Image (tube, rainbow, N blue to C red):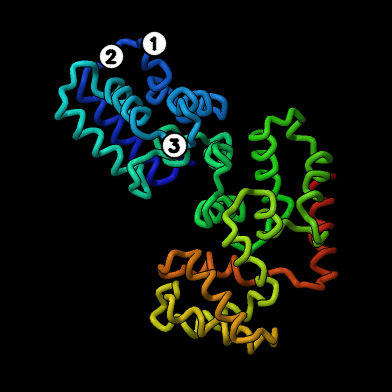
Amino acid sequence: KLSGDTMEVKRFLVETKRKKRPMALNRKSSILCQLYEKKHFTSKEFRRLWDFYDKDGSGFLEYSELERFLRDLTEVTLGEDVDEAEYEKFKAKIMGLIDDNQNGKLEAKELSKIIPTEENFLLAYSIQSQNLGAHLSSQDFLEIWCHYDKDCSGYLDFTEAKDFMKDMLKVNSVKVDLNNVQYLDTFFKTFDTDDNGVIEIDEMAAIFPVEERFTNALKQRKRFSKEEFDRLFDAYDTNKSGSLNAKQLPKMIADLNKSSKTNMSDKQVAEISGRLIQMFLNKDIPRTELSLVISSNTPQHGKQFKREMNEKRQSLMS
């Protein structure tokens, strides 16, 4: 299913193209012409297109690379006889729709709004992190996590993890039968490092090149239960906005420390709060993201939970 942003971009491109005569397929635009011929690109097609324009392998389309892509896209959409004013208008519209961080560059995940790649959600993030040793931002990682953690539980059971593992294997070009449940089960166990029958967010973060401040922020998550988090969040979210600001957060962390009897010092509470505020760029922090980072929904010593999760996994394998 295409996201709302992707649908908006596709709708704009298709509607714009209808206003002009269709152009003949030529060597220069042959890759981009597929935009109007198919609903999504395969992983290989998306990677081939990205490498075609990202000549220096930086993980971004910028300067002459970006200009070349946008001019090719303009030609495919509007035709060859486009004057400079019309090109600049088209360019501004496209960049306004897909350049999320407004840095004048295009990342693979932003380009995927124009070139939707439904086969593998991880592909765009993989391209980004593979270039120049780039680290995923906290926001990027949380987007990845929430894509697979459908119920926002804070962990992936085997059903949710299957899609993640299949995408992971494709990205890394591992040639195995992706429907081999026994192989996926073995792969699952390599991620489930505490052997509690699920993959938790900190276990997934350990295999991605995520920025250090995010992995540091995850270190205290098992100190606080999801139930206690929900109770205190509701108390602090007095206007029911679904988020907390930078002033409310340290107070809530301090109260979590007291109610959970974790015996952290004031200095530790301040350090945790500071890391979280920095990680979320001093903006209001949404409930779901904050809950994922600082609380755990799995019992630390839950033998029954572990047994239930493993029984569920075994039933899916049979």
Residue found 67% across the figure and 68% down from its top: 219
Residue on which the image places disc 3: 60
Position of residue 238 relative to residue 77, above or below, is below
The residue closer to the viewer here, 51 or 11, is 51
The tag earlier along the polypeptide, 3 or 2, is 2
Position of residue 296 relative to residue 25, above or below, is below
Are the residues flagged by discs 2 and 1 in contact, CB closer than 8 Å?
no
Quick check: can you spot residue 207?
A: yes
Q: In which quarter of the image is residue 245?
A: bottom left
Position of residue 286 relative to residue 85, above or below, is below
Residue on which the image places disc 2: 23
Residue found 83% across the figure and 57% down from its top: 310
The tag earlier along the polypeptide, 3 or 1, is 1
The residue closer to the viewer here, 52 or 166, is 52
Q: Residues within 10 Å of mark 3 (few under 14, many from 20)?
A: many
Residue found 47% across the figure and 83% down from its top: 236
Separation of residues labelled 2 and 1 (CA atoms): 12 Å
Q: Residues within 10 Å of mark 2 (few under 14, many from 20)?
A: some
Q: Quadrant of the C terminus?
A: top right
Residue found 40% across the figure and 68% down from its top: 283
- Check disc 1 and give the amino acid type: Arg
- Check disc 2 and give the amino acid type: Met
Callout 3 secondary element: strand
- Frontmost of labels 3 and 2 is 3
Callout 2 secondary element: loop
- Check disc 3 and give the amino acid type: Phe
Separation of residues labelled 3 and 2 (CA atoms): 28 Å
Residue 249 image point, x, y percent: 49, 78
